[in-house]
């Protein structure tokens, strides 16, 4: 697996275009990894599934039982994730992306999706792009998906970073509500934000056991690693106003995922013929 390396000051990013257009490593000199680094085995899989960060395109999270309702249509999407009985996280994470541009501190990747004849995968043509711009303060990731069909179709975007996690790692963000889920992590209903999941004041994420989609996000969040003396400011543009927070028990990572639509709701997210949905996610670092 050939990695594409970006460098700026003490910042380092390694990209894996052939493994889902993913980020294999994001690190700061003198601190270490900020995201869970991809193993050789993860990269050899040819997917972004177990890397540091991968794109969610053309949808985020799960489509219940592969049944995608869009207007008067009901489309069937195949399962694509090991051990999960629902299509999950789109198709970009499992595709090889083309390197369009590479410089010392920036790169651009392209993924063109053409449905297979008679296939049950994503049925609509699209073109997705990622841009990565690294500087001494952090990383900017641009994402876009262009509808190549001659009619309006459902399309969404998201980014799935795996942040490293210590016992005292803390998260702060403003949210207004959350989707309750069933045993298969499928959304049941939207409810006002419970006080136990209120991150308006920075709080430790250890032990929360979350895997939920939150609404009413203002596009800003911060992650603090007190032991490392580092704070990361996460910000996202208007395309991303939902936030998936995943804090698995017994793991040394957690996820804060800016996404364009609520879990299971990509069918309510139409994109006009020839139109592009685009946004940016910024990771900016500071010392505390």
Image (spheres, helix red, strand yellow):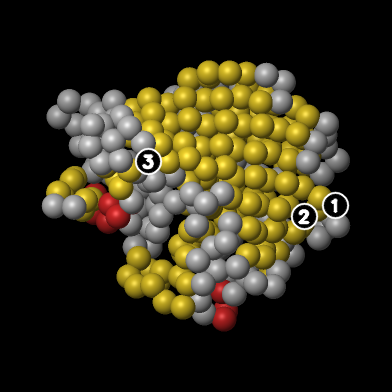
Helix, strand or loop under label 2: strand
Q: Residue at x 33, y 32 (%)?
A: 274
Q: Position of residue 150 (x, y in %)?
A: 23, 32
Q: Position of residue 151 (x, y in %)?
A: 23, 37
Q: Earlier in the sequence, mark 2 or mark 3?
A: 3
In this rendering, position of residue 44 left or right of residue 169: left
In front: 113, or 161?
113
Tell me which corner region of the image, top left, top right, bottom left or bottom right, holds residue 272.
top left
Q: Report the number of discs.
A: 3
Q: Which residue is mark 2?
A: 231
In this rendering, position of residue 165 left or right of residue 144: right
Regarding residue 121, the answer to whether it shows in the image is no
Helix, strand or loop under label 3: loop
Q: Residue at x 80, y 36 (%)?
A: 136
Q: Are marks 1 and 2 in contact (CB under 8 Å)?
A: yes
Q: Earlier in the sequence, mark 3 or mark 1?
A: 3
Q: Which residue is mark 3?
A: 58
In this rendering, position of residue 101 left or right of residue 114: right
Q: Position of residue 262 (x, y in %)?
A: 40, 59
Q: State the CA–CA distance, disc 3 to disc 1.
A: 35 Å
Q: Quadrant of the N terminus?
A: top right
Q: Which residue is mark 1?
A: 287
Q: Position of residue 80 (x, y in %)?
A: 32, 41
Q: State the CA–CA distance, disc 1 to disc 2.
A: 6 Å
Q: Are marks 2 and 3 in contact (CB under 8 Å)?
A: no
Q: Earlier in the sequence, mark 1 or mark 2?
A: 2
Q: Residue at x 57, y 81 (%)?
A: 195
Q: Quadrant of the C terminus?
A: bottom right
* Vertical order, 43 against 54 (above or below): above
Regarding residue 170, the answer to whether it shows in the image is yes
Packing grade of label 2 (10 A; few <14, some 14-19, many >=20) is some
């Amino acid at each position: 697996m050939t990695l594409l390396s970006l460098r700026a000051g003490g910042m380092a990013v390694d990209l894996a275009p052939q493994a889902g257009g993913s980020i294999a490593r994001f690190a700061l000199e003198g601190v270490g990894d900020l995201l869970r680094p991809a193993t050789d085995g993860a990269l050899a899989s040819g997917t972004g599934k177990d890397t540091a960060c991968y794109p969610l395109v053309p949808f985020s999270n799960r489509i219940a039982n592969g049944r995608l309702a869009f207007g008067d249509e009901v489309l069937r999407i195949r399962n694509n994730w090991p051990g999960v009985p629902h299509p999950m996280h789109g198709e970009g994470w499992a595709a090889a992306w083309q390197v369009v541009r590479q410089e010392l501190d920036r790169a651009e990747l392209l993924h063109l999706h053409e449905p297979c004849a008679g296939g049950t995968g994503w049925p609509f043509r699209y073109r997705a792009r990622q841009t990565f711009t690294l500087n001494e303060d952090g990383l900017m990731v641009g994402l876009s998906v262009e509808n190549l069909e001659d009619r309006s179709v459902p399309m969404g975007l998201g980014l799935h970073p795996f942040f490293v996690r210590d016992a005292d790692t803390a998260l702060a963000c403003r949210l207004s509500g959350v989707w309750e889920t069933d045993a298969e992590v499928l959304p049941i209903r939207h409810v006002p934000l419970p006080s136990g999941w209120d991150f308006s004041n920075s709080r430790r994420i250890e032990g929360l056991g979350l895997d939920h989609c939150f609404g009413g996000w203002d596009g800003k969040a911060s992650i603090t690693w007190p032991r490392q003396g580092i704070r990361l400011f996460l910000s996202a543009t208007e395309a991303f106003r939902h936030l998936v927070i995943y804090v698995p028990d017994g793991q040394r990572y957690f996820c804060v995922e800016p996404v364009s639509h609520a879990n299971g709701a990509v069918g309510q997210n139409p994109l006009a013929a020839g139109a592009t949905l685009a946004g940016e996610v910024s990771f900016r670092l500071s010392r505390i």
